[in-house]
Amino acid sequence: MTAIDPQTLICRLQTLQRRLHDMANDLGNLTDPEIVAVSEEADRLIVQLQRMRMEESGRRRDSANPTSDSEAV
């Protein structure tokens, strides 16, 4: 899978949010299959963004506290 820039994900999520809002107003039924499909796509992007942020946080933490395996024993 190709890595996507976090800002690109955020922009895509904002687009989906506007689309969901418009669809909910137009269709009036939040359980409409089209709305559910767009919502699920947004959910996948949210999870992807959260994972990216967790990985980045772990890398920053690891670089701030470099320890070797022998020090941890």
Image (cartoon, helix red, strand yellow):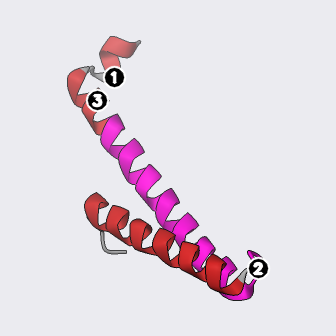
Q: Secondary structure at mark 3?
A: helix
Magenta segment, which residues? 29-58
Between the residue at mark 1 and the residue at mark 3, the CA separation in whole angstroms equals: 13 Å
Q: Earlier in the sequence, mark 2 or mark 3?
A: 2
Q: Nearer the viewer, mark 2 or mark 3?
A: 2
Q: Nearer the viewer, mark 1 or mark 3?
A: 3
Task: Judge whether residue 66 can be spotted in this image.
Answer: no
- For disc 3, the marked residue is 62
Q: Nearer the viewer, residue 67 or 60?
A: 60
State left or right for residue 10 relative to residue 21: left
Q: Earlier in the sequence, mark 1 or mark 3?
A: 3
- For disc 2, the marked residue is 29
Residue type, numbered disc 3:
Asp
Residue type, numbered disc 1:
Asp
Which residue is drawn at the image coordinates 30% and 59% (left, top)? 6
- Horizontal and vertical percent position of residue 3: 30, 68
